[in-house]
Amino acid sequence: MPAPRVIDLRSDTVTKPTPAMRKAMAEAEVGDDAYGDDPTVNELEARAATLMGKEAGMYVPSGSMANLAAALAWCARGEELICGVDTHLLVNEMGAIAAFGGIQMRALPNDRRGMLDAQLVDDTISPAAGWFPRTALLSLENTHNRGNGTPFTAVELAPLSEVAHRRGLAVHVDGARLMNAAVALGVPPAELAAVGDSVCFCLSKGLSAPVGSLLTGPADFIARARKVRKAAGGGMRQAGVIAAAGLVALDTMVDRLAEDHANAHRLAEGMADLPGFAVDPAEIRTNIVYVELEDGDGPGLAAALKARGVLANGRFNWVRLVTHYGITAEDIEEALDVIATVARGRSRI
């Protein structure tokens, strides 16, 4: 008996590797990456650095490890970084930077899209004297997860980068979905990466590789980050087996992100017309859709959708839906039919 049909919109982390990726993985040339001997990993790291306009790159198992390595490579224990109150590395990464690095994370308010105010950043940077910790790093996020996947242009982020550099801070860009931003804005990834001294991006979300992220930046920074990766248990061996899928992802999966963006916009349009939901389709420019609920029951809605074969993440007063490889335009229409049925039922309660 076939399994019940499920439309999984929880995250783009649920993507499956393509047949071309599986073939490349089976045929990958490998070596011991901890010794720097894996040619496939080396090629992937070089490709990533070039793509981001940086000197060097490092392959890591996850985006969380990329952010951890970046923070610990830029900051000493007892120093601080500045980030937005809704940024992923603060909210969704288990407090690892504070736990493992002894780094204070100073959270500033961000607007609905996830943007920080440059003047507030300037006013918050510590003088590093007397009782104050040294502020060493400003962390930005592009696209911004909790900001409906907003893609920020280099022009928008430049004032933040300029303030940080003028005050002696490094700038790290958590670009987990930077490729989505580049496609949505129609610019090369290096243009968006230029505002950061270091930039990471993910292969296992919209690009559909099974494992991994890349951290890029100056060669001396990457050398420090490699020590953090090793200390965190990320020193891999014959990692070319998985890095091969990342090379295929860069070759074949970037341009198709536009399909995910179109599907997300259609999803937002459909939900905006239903009772009890608040979402502005004009805000949806990449593949993430946050919908606020009039009844405030995100988990309840997610549970009701799951019972009908549509998976979404629900917390507090919102649900989040993410489009990705494997989700078609037809799937979106089917999901909207299910969502409409659930919405009508909830409106009668």
Image (tube, rainbow, N blue to C red):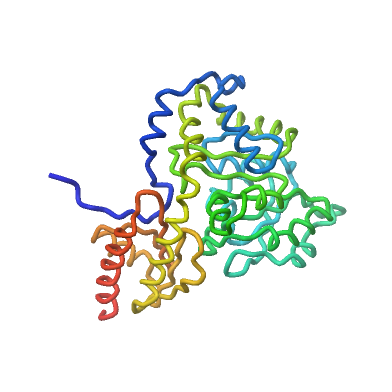
Say how many tags the image has.
Answer: 0
Q: Quadrant of the N terminus?
A: top left
Residue 88 picture location, percent across and down: 56, 54
Quadrant of res 221: top right
Residue 54 picture location, percent across and down: 70, 40
**Residue furthest toward the right?**
130
Quadrant of res 16: top left
- Front residue of 17 and 114: 17
Using the image, determine if residue 44 lies above or below residue 202: above
**Residue furthest toward the left?**
1
**Residue furthest toward the bottom?**
348
Residue 89 picture location, percent across and down: 59, 51
Q: Is residue 97 left or right of residue 131?
A: left
The residue that appears at 33% across and 55% down in the rendered structure is 328
The residue that appears at 67% across and 51% down in the rendered structure is 191
- Front residue of 327 and 339: 327
- Front residue of 168 and 19: 19
Q: Is residue 112 left or right of residue 272?
A: right
- Front residue of 160 and 188: 188
Residue 277 picture location, percent across and down: 39, 75
The residue that appears at 69% across and 42% down in the rendered structure is 53
Q: Is residue 32 left or right of residue 322?
A: right
Q: Quadrant of the C terminus?
A: bottom left
